[in-house]
Amino acid sequence: MNELDLHHVEVEDAFWSPRLEMNAARAILHQWDQLEKTCCIDNFRIAAGEKDAFREGWFFADSDAYKWLDAACRIQTTHSSPGLRERIDTLVSLLARAQQPDGYLYTYNQIHFPGQRWVNLQIEHELYCLGHLIEGCLSYDEMETGSDTRPASPPVAGEGSQALAIACKAAGLLVRELLEAGPEYSDGHEEIELALIKLHRRTGDLGYLDLAQRLIERRGRIPHFALVIRKQESSRQKRHRQVQARRSAYVADHPKHASFRLPPDNVSKQVRFGRQRRLLSALSGKMFQQDRPVRETRVPVGHAVRFAYLQTAAAMLARERGDRELQVALEATWRHMVERRMYVTGGLGALPAIEGFGRDCELDPEASYSETCAALGSLFWNWEMALLTREARYADLFEWQLYNAASVGMGRHGTTYLYNNPLTCRGGIERRAWFAVPCCPSNLSRTWAALGGYLLSAEEDSAWVHQYAGCRAEIPPTRSHDNESGFRLRVESGFPWQGCAHIELQAESPVERTLHLRIPSWTRGYQVRVNGRAWEPIPLPQDRQTPVATACGYAPHGAFYLPIRRTWAPGDTVDLELPMPIVVRRPSNKVRGSRGTAAITRGPVVYCLESTDNPGIDLFGARVDRKTLRAEPASEVLGEGGELEAGLWLVRGQTVDGRPLTMIPYFAWANRGPSQMNVMVRV
């Protein structure tokens, strides 16, 4: 399948349009202010020799500016703003001045350790930062040129945007210095791999694709990894002490700088022996996905974000190379994750100490880390798997994580965020304006801004509807029909609250195509009408008829694509109706911490109890009377102008002793001040 870029899809949706407007009008500008406040942008001014100050932030802080650039350019593509464009151009110009002549750009080394490169790659994330630099520059180039697709011929020197030149200079340096390097030259935080593949798709340069493949294939092949990581950690600590000594000397000469502080870290509940397990995970290589080659991987391990980014890059590589062996490994690893190591929200990561996976069925709801970035990484992976395999299960999990594990990360006003996302909170976890490691806010913004590109895709004679969000989309003509002009689809949707979608074809002349509609795993039937007449349903696929047991109670395996092949005339319509029952999803008895509990879901939305709506109720001990559960619009429960976001649907019910209960969408919690919350309720 082929993606539709942001210039060819316009989102017009009751649920998503307000979020995208908020993302463009508030979130992205708030994030820029925070990057300035925490000196992230100043670091580039220092590296460019334009400011006399001290570099602040983590060694990988550059990546936060690059993700902001990525998000801002995607937003500018669909929500043009002169003020935002000015900031974008300011940053790109600054990056060009800070970049060294040969393409190197990593302010930690440039400022503190000039001349040192590729030091402590497993820990200090040079390649990770350069990967996000490339992605940000590609989004700028797409904003400028109107396309992210491969050109007829690679750009030559002097062509393309300034940002594309920055990306190509950085990637060219990597190809020259790392293409023939050994396995130790792979980054501890995956990202550069997928960025290089995207750059290859944009430029057609095979050197970028070759390097991406070698970086992927090198993983799990470093001899004596435990000794390597101990040596690099010792070096990191030594370098850190040197930086701190220089900072003390700088503060002595500049007393006003002594008051500078990064925001505090996020709060999470630690599990027993967490530190020891972190050490073992690091020494074994599992934390970095360095324990075994990717083709031999069948079990998700280690840091969840790094894992998801590696799987995304591997899926992209499999699609580029037509690599069936790699696809088989990816499919097996995905099944293991979904069936044994994923929370019912789609959250990934049970161990806060490593921000990653625990053992099979180790899914304590209160200790759940489920970092927002891990959910976003899984979205990227599922999207690539859907394009690679044409299997609806991947788009189904994309939808589930989109509305739950990912959407929970951004507050309703776009200026507060959650980093980690437990399923049970007894207090202490609140949304914050920024974090010491602010990787999630801009990652969320760039994903929201690119939402239109995840809704549909096209093939030679087919169009695929993966997600039901209101939009207008241009479907390109088939390559085999030179005179065909393509056509447009207009989609209207009631998701995620009502299981209805209306699709209208807009074309200049009839076209013969197959329209593939995703039938979600969470529905219990479907009705389709073409031009008002019932379309004959097809028999359910075999895997749809045989439910798959999972540790968390949610299984996307039963989703499938319904093909409708016909000659479509201008103005033809398709109406899809999907029942949205309230479903009680019980986890496996093997899941400790959740025994005797269940999650309440409706359609693609997971619900929770929040203390704000249930005064006097013990959220963790109350027993819900299943027979009383019903869905209602929030306006009918709280009245107009209520504290919750307008348009939400709630689940209402009673405890077994008759006390009223209100459940809100999980993504909406923590928006009204400190509270307790619980997804896994006793039913």
Image: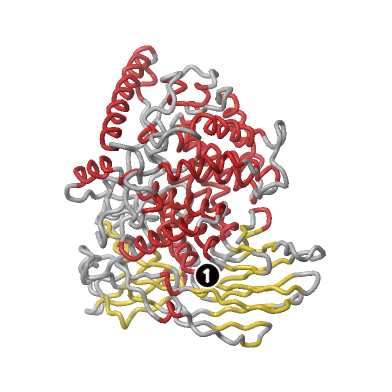
Which residue appears farthest toward the top when viewing the image?
Answer: 253
Looking at the figure, which quarter contains the N terminus?
bottom right
Tell me what residue is drawn at x 48 percent, y 16 percent. 52
Instruction: Give x and y (percent) for residue 621.
Output: 20, 68
Looking at the figure, which quarter contains the C terminus?
bottom left
Q: Is residue 260 left or right of residue 366?
A: right
- Judge by depth and name the residue closer to the eye, 392 or 507: 392
The image quarter in which residue 667 lies: bottom left
- Evaluate whether residue 191 shows in this view: yes
- Evaluate whether residue 618 shows in this view: no
Could you tell me which secondary element the residue under label 1 belongs to? loop
The image quarter in which residue 643 lies: bottom left
Residue that badge 1 annotates: 495
User: Relative to residue 327, is residue 54 depicted above or below?
Assistant: above
Which residue appears farthest toward the left when viewing the image?
Answer: 272
Q: Is residue 509 left or right of residue 434?
A: right
Tell me what residue is drawn at x 68 percent, y 53 percent. 7
The image quarter in which residue 665 lies: bottom left
Instruction: Give x and y (percent) for residue 10.
Output: 65, 59
Q: Is residue 215 left or right of residue 243?
A: right
Tell me what residue is drawn at x 58 percent, y 74 percent. 501
User: Relative to residue 664, is residue 273 depicted above or below?
Assistant: above
- Judge by depth and name the residue closer to the eye, 638 or 295: 295
User: Relative to residue 266, is residue 249 depicted above or below?
Assistant: above
Amino acid beneath label 1: Phe
Which residue appears farthest toward the right when viewing the image?
Answer: 483
